[in-house]
Amino acid sequence: MSRIGKLPVVIPAGVKVSTAGQTVNVEGPKGKLSKAFDPVVEVKVDGASVLVTPKSDTRFANAMHGTARAIINKMVKGVTVGYAKKLTIEGVGFKAAVKGDVIDLALGYSHPVFVKIPAGIKVVVNEGTKIEITGSDDQVVGQVAAAIYQFYPVEPYKGKGVRVDGQFVRRKEGKKTA
């Protein structure tokens, strides 16, 4: 049995958690989240905590036990504190701008790159090169950051591209001329 799955998820004040069948709904000050889980686990709201138990003793049920508990914990954290990813764009002429629900990226290509911002996600661009993505759903925040990063990952010679804050990029030495 999962050591993580055995731990109860503590529900902080101001957060409401409810279950309907296999769907867990979490509502808090930062928004609402809903997720359906596999029927091999049972989710119960017990006062100020959420308990997840496997229904059978199969390998899959034990794996889903810890996974479901971790996802519910992230949902509770997301509606109370929220999640954020910071990206930095480096390169001459590289910049970003938010236009409505689209991020307009100039990444050195012959055309601009557009990324649609999903509902519930807030994107702020500072100084034209610093992007901050915030939201209550960790998976969606990470997915938007990955989509932006994917257009121009940091290259190792000049360090140009989209960089996730805290990311280490090994720099390489360029060609040597005699």
Image (tube, rainbow, N blue to C red):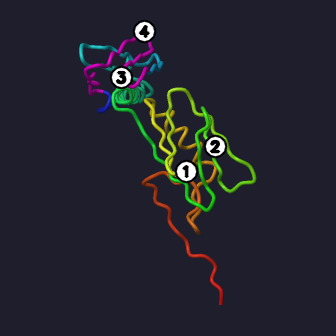
Q: Looking at this view, is 4 or 1 the one in front?
A: 4
* Amino acid, disc 1: Gly
Residue located beneath label 1 in the image: 128
Q: Quadrant of residue 14?
A: top left
**Cα–Cα span, label 1 and label 3:** 30 Å
Disc on the earlier residue, 3 or 2: 3
**Cα–Cα span, label 1 and label 4:** 44 Å
Q: Looking at this view, is 69 or 105 the one in front?
A: 105
Image quarter of the N terminus? top left
In the image, residue 177 lies at what x, y percent? 65, 86
- Give the SS element for disc 4: strand
Q: Are marks 1 and 4 in contact (CB under 8 Å)?
A: no
Residue drawn 44% across the image and 21% down it: 33
Q: Is residue 104 magenta?
A: no
Q: Looking at this view, is 134 or 56 the one in front?
A: 134
* Amino acid, disc 4: Ala
Residue 20 is marked as 4
Above or below residue 154? Residue 102 is above
Disc on the earlier residue, 4 or 3: 4
